[in-house]
Structures are given as structure tokens and as C-alpha cells.
Amino acid sequence: MSQATQDELARVVREHAGRLAASLVSLIGDFPAAEDLVQDAIEAALSHWPNEGIPSNPDGWLYTVARRRGLDVLRRNARHRDKLAIAAWPPRPESDDRLRLIFTCCHPALPRSAQIALTLRVVCGLTTAQIAKAFLIPETTVAQRITRAKRKISDAGIPYRVPDADEWGARLSEVLTVVYLLFNEAYLPSTPQPAGDNLAEDADFLATLLSGLMPAEPEVLGLLALIRLHRARAAARFTAHGEIIQLPHQDRALWDHDAIAEATRLLAKAAGLRRPGPYQLQAAIVAVHAEAPSFADTDWQQIVLLYTMLDGLNPSPVTKLHRAIALRYVVGPEEALSEVDLLGGVLDGYHLWHATRAELLRDLGHGERAREADERALRLTANPAEQSLLRQRISWA
Amino acid sequence: MKYVLMFADTEQYAADLATMDEAERERAYARVRQWFADNAGRIRGHVHLMPPHSATTVRLDRGEPVVTDGPFVEGKEVISGFAEIDVADLDEALRLVKTWPACPVVEIRPVAG
């Protein structure tokens, strides 16, 4: 199967799996049972469609398979079975129930790893095998997380609904964290990643879906803008050999400037809603970089200001580290280094802290100490592209 | 759905309580009584336990029953009471528990069957 066919297949499944899951959960009122049926239908599609072609109405095809399977496996559960027997497709074409689905998958009573696996499987239609491959973990681990999460949903009485106003903020931020972590894994995996950009595609899909379902939530738009801005620069981030090209050395002509403009418009729309938040601020930082004609022409003052706001909203040593990196271009490496050194206590186990120190020390002419810091950083990252970059610096120093 | 709320005290909470003067402690108890009164419609019953020094544990998996002093888990968090509630779902239970005015840890467990 060609890459193009595979991408098309993934796109069609993503578009329809969540809708089918949402409809079936509403229909039979049992999340785990409905999810099993959808998963069976997706497995069937993945084995039939590559040979037979993608049908003209993929949702109807998936529904027919799920329904047939449901009538068979739900034999013993007369109540579920009867509901399925009289159902017609499409059930309620005007409504999109996927919001309920997402909030259930990202319920705070589920562990984070299960929220991520469940969202990918239920909302994006990934199979257990695909999730295992994307995260480089054994398939049995993923299967176990899914099974436990589904058991918890039924046994603990996790409701299938959109949260009420009083819990909306906390629950929405839970959902956004799941999408954000998913994107981080895709954008800068902590472990070597097989070829393909599918997780980034899934994160983009989820953020797009959420922004369609919640157009008045500025942080949803901010997260979507953040993902789009990062993806717009993806072509310039690696050499042909998979080595990282750092921002100062990236060929900005390779950036997708239309996508950057589009994402910036999204961000402006979010800002118009006048409720700033960490995703909007992060996207704004990336936008300042993306709009700079060259590294030297970057508006560093603006970046320092945005990091200061971000740290004010969500105090974090990593944000302070990034602020210090930007500070180097506003006030120079010496002051930046003293800011960075203040964070040593909490960030001693973080490879970027050591890598940043190495760069600043090198700027200040302390080659030997820079080299030591690079070596510490190298021991602390599992990402092959980052390792290779650090190795190069060590051998040049 | 029926759930049991298991209330747990921490050493810090016990210490805080011990340093309160009579009036403060009475206010703390009043807040708890108020919470039970406010949620009376959803609470089917509740008990407050004596402190863990009063616990006795019997183990029946070692041939003869073995009786020991103290709770079965020696931990920093000790169960201090139970309440059984009847609510629509976990979200309603969570909403209820988030307003609990006393001890710092509450476990929510569905009742089987």
C-alpha cells in the first residue's frame, strides 16, 4: 500500500470513527460495548479497504459492519441488541456527539496514559497496534490500558456527557492537555520514532475538531494555532539524515508561510475573545518566531515579554529557562547565564538546562565548561536527533 | 449509583486539629455538620471512626487467626470515617466531595452489586 493510500485511509477512518463511536454510545448506552463494535468495524475496514478501495460512503459501511457485529455479540444483552436492531443510519445527522466522547475519554478519574490511548482509539479510530507503534510500547500494554479504562468508566459510573458550567474550565483543560501531550510526542518524541507524521496529524485533527465544536473557547483556538505554527515549520527542522536543525540555522524559505498566516489569524481570533491562556501565549511566542524574516530580526523583547506573561499565568522553571534563552538576545549571554544558573536546583535532571548552559558558556569563551554541560545534556536525553546534535557540538568544541 | 466515601486523615491534619483552640475546633465541627445537613438528600448514612490507636487487625490467611494492634495498613493516611451516598454518577459524587470541609483526602468507591 502506498503512503498516499495509507494517509487517505487514516484520514477517512479519523473522520468517521469518532462519529460512529459517539452515535453507538448514545444508541446502546454502553460506552465499552459500543467502543468494541467500532474497533471491530475499523479492523474490518483496514483489512478490506486497501484491496477493495475506500467505499463511497465510508460511514455507512462502518456502521453496517458494527451493527451486524453488534447484533451477533450482543445476543445475550437483549436490551442493547434491540436498540441496535431498530436503529437506522445515520442516526441524527445534524448533531455531532463527539464532544461528549472526548470529555469521557479525558475524564480526570482516568490515568493520563489511558486518557491518551482512549482518545486516540475512540475519537481518532486508531487501532491498539497503531497506538503501540506510535508510542513504541508493547501492544499488550496499550490493550491493558484501554481495557482498564473502559472497566473504570462502567464500574465507577463515569458519565457520558459534556461537563456542567461549574466544572467546564478544569475539564476542558484536561482535554487540551491530552491533545497537547499527544502533539509533543509527535513533534519531539522522547524516544526514537518510526517514519510518518501520523500522531501530529491526529493531534491536529483533534484540535481542529475541538475548535469546530467549541468556537468560543480561546484556549482551544490557541492550541490549534500552536500546533499549526509548529507544523508549518516542520520541513525545515531536520536534515535528510534526521538531524535537528536549530532555529537560527533553519532555511525559512522552507516554512509554509500560508499556514503561518492562517494560524496567526486563528490566534488573533482567540485574542479577540479576551481570555488569555497558556496555549495562546505559547502560540504567540511561536508566531513571533514564525513571522521574523531572520533569526537576527526576531523581536526578542516581545518574546521575553510573552514568556514573562506565561510564567505569571503558569509558573514553571522550564518557562523561566526559555525566558532566559530569549533574554540572551536582549541583554547578552552573561545575564542570561546568571538567570539560567538560578534554575539549576530544579532543572538539574533536564537536558535542555545543561544544553542551554553549554551554549551560553561557549558564547562567553568557557569552552571546557561548555563541553562538560553538553555531556551532561547528552546523558539526559533519549531523543536520537537531540543526541546527535549534542554529539556534534561536543566533537566541535 | 451508590458510592462509599472513605475519609482519610493525614498526620498534618491531625496536628492542625490538635493546635486549634476550643472555639476553632467547634467551628470546624460545625462546618462538617452543615455539610451533612446540606447534602442530607444524597447521604444514606455515615460513621466517624475512633482514631487508629484504637484499631485491632485480625489476619485470617496464616492458618490460625493472628490478632495485631493497629490498622491493617500503616500509612500516613488513615481512614477516619465513611459515608454512603446515592447520586447519578461519578461527576455528581466528585462535585459533592469537592465541597467536603474537613479531612484532606477522600476516596470514592462504587458499591458493588
Image (spheres, coloured by chain):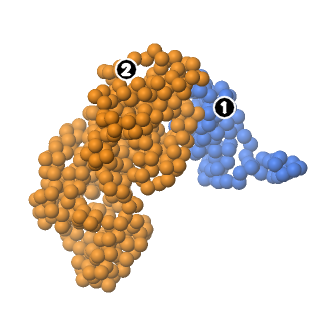
Chain colours: A orange, B blue
Element at label 1: loop
The image quarter in which residue A271 lies: top left
Quick one: which residue is furthest to the right in this view? B64
Q: Which label was assigned to residue A89? A: 2
Local packing at callout 2 (Cα closer than 10 Å; few below 14, some 14-19, many 20+) is: few
Residue B19, percent across and down?
63, 51
Amino acid carrying label 1: it is: Ala
Where does the image place residue B96, in percent across and percent down from the top left?
A: 54, 32
Q: Residue at x 47, y 31 (%)?
A: A37
Question: Could you say whether the residue bearing mark 2 is in a helix, strand or loop?
Answer: loop
Relative to A140, A169 lies left or right = left
The label nearer to you, 1 versus 2, is 2
Q: Chain of mark 1?
A: B
Q: Is residue A162 visible?
A: no
Residue lying at 53% horizontally and 49% vertically, measured from the top left = A140
Does residue B75 appear anywhere in the picture? yes
Q: Which mark is residue B112?
A: 1
> Residue A26's x, y, as percent?
44, 24
The quarter of the picture where residue A290 lies is bottom left
| Residue type beneath disc 2 | Trp
Mark drawn on residue B94: none
How many other residues sit within 10 Å of disc 1, few (<14), some (14-19) or many (≥20)? few
Disc 1 to disc 2, how far (Cα)? Answer: 36 Å
Q: Nearer the viewer, residue A205 or A102?
A: A205
Q: Which residue lies at the image location 50% right of the left edge and 42% below the top edge? A: A146
Q: Would you place residue A235 above or below residue B78 in this image?
A: below
